[in-house]
Amino acid sequence: MKIKLLCLGRLNKEIENELCERYLKRTNILKKSGISDLTIDHLNIENLKKRLNSSKEKSFFFELSEKGKSYSTHDFVQKLNYLITNSFKYCFFIIGKPDGNKENLIKADEKICLSKMTFTHSLSRVILVEQIYRCATIMINHPYHK
């Protein structure tokens, strides 16, 4: 399954971008986990609409929202395993604008919350890619998560 983070807004935080790149590289090496590719795309609203409407293959869409469901790492692993074993080709994580999804642009399959606390978009990306990497290591019994 390919996982894509679709981000609205700026990606101009050098330190956070560097951390994201590290976790992207680490995750993309762990092919046996079932995650074949992890990427981060910066999009404007028009390109996000096109991307959401053009997905013809079996895809699952998460929207990050402060009102979303909170997952433990164990539950998040189970969710990603479910998507992999049920032949989802793509899994999209949508990080919207700081003021939320006011236009109801995003029709997500599920809304998720990283924490009850509020994070910047750049830090949210780091936390999310680290958790995806952690899930991949758990799936292959790699010692990172211990």
Image (cartoon, rainbow, N blue to C red):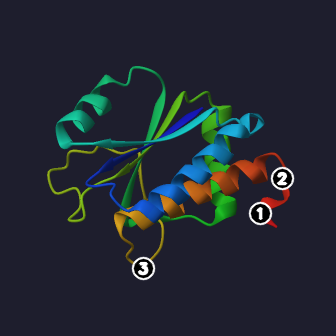
3D distance between C-alphas at marks 3 and 2: 29 Å
Query: Dot 2, how many residues are within 10 Å of its Cα: few (below 14), some (14-19), or many (20+)?
Result: few
Check the image and report above or below for 91 versus 100: above
Query: Dot 3, how many residues are within 10 Å of its Cα: few (below 14), some (14-19), or many (20+)?
Result: few
Query: Dot 1, how many residues are within 10 Å of its Cα: few (below 14), some (14-19), or many (20+)?
Result: few
> Where residue 142 is drawn, which disc sits there?
2
> Where residue 117 is drawn, which disc sits there?
3
Horizontal placement of 95 versus 48: left or right?
A: right
Pick whichever, 37 or 92, lies toward us: 37
Check the image and report above or below for 8 versus 86: below
* Mark 1 element type: helix
Q: Quadrant of residue 38?
A: top right
Check the image and report above or below for 85 versus 68: above
The image position of residue 94, as x and y in percent, is 37, 48
N-terminal label among 3 and 1? 3
Residue extending furthest toward the front: 14
Q: Which circle, 3 or 2, is nearer the viewer? A: 2
Horizontal placement of 131 versus 39: left or right?
A: right
Residue tagged by mark 1? 145
Q: Residue at x 72, y 34 (%)?
A: 31
Q: Which circle, 3 or 1, is nearer the viewer? A: 1
Q: Are marks 2 and 1 in contact (CB under 8 Å)?
A: yes
The image position of residue 49, as x and y in percent, is 23, 35
Q: Is residue 103 visible?
A: yes
In the picture, the quarter occupied by the C terminus is bottom right
Q: Are marks 3 and 1 in contact (CB under 8 Å)?
A: no
Residue extending furthest toward the bottom: 117
> Where residue 127 is drawn, which disc sits there?
none
Residue extending furthest toward the top: 56
Q: Quadrant of residue 40?
A: top left
- Residue type at tag 3: Met
